[in-house]
Amino acid sequence: MSVDADHDTSAAADQEWELQEQLVNEAVRLGLETSFREPILEAVKESGAVETRGASDDTDEPTVGDDGVTEESGSSPVTTVVQGLVVFVVMFVVLYVVLRKLTGGGSE
């Protein structure tokens, strides 16, 4: 392989990575504008991998009481986990379909 071919492959991989990153960022941004905002924020906090931009300590996030039920929303931790899993599955499927269409992997 020539140096130019290696450079072109590297540039294409960089562009693909940037596109994937933009898609994920957009999906998360849109997800934060829905009713699934709290499960997404909790998942981000639990992972500790991503620093939330613009989040401060004085946000309107619900607090958890002694009985394990969130005081503001009234939902149990099980409901929150189920909501988080649903959000994850939906976002995964959407990203899979979009990336498959963009890469031309679909035969439709």
Image: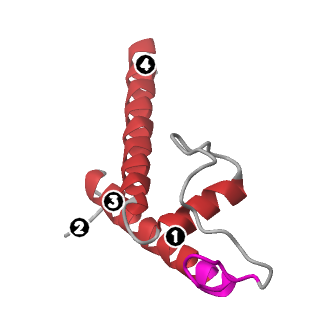
Q: Which residue is mark 1?
A: 88
Question: Which residue lies at the image location 52% right of the left edge and 70% below the top edge?
Answer: 88
- Mark 1 vs mark 4, CA separation in Å: 35 Å
Identify the residue at the far right of this view: 66
Report the residue marked by disc 4. 7
- Viewer-proximal residue among 86 and 59: 59
Residue at screen point 38% across, 42% down? 22
- Return the x and y of residue 90 as percentages of the image width and height: 43, 73
Circle nearer the N terminus (3, 2) = 3
Residue to which mark 2 is pinned: 107
As for residue 80 lying within the magenta part, the answer is yes
Tell which tag, 1 or 4, sits nearer the viewer. 1
Task: Indicate left or right for 89 with 66 as reference.
Answer: left
Q: Is residue 93 above or below residue 75?
A: above
Q: Nearer the viewer, mark 3 or mark 2?
A: 3
Amino acid type at image mark 3: Arg
The magenta stretch is 68-81
Q: Nearer the viewer, residue 97 or 75?
A: 75
**Residue position marked by numbered label 3 in the rendering:** 100
Disc 3 to disc 1, C-alpha distance: 18 Å
Q: Residues within 10 Å of mark 2 (few under 14, many from 20)?
A: few
Residue 84 location, quadrant: bottom right
Instruction: Quote the CA–CA distance across marks 3 and 2.
Output: 10 Å
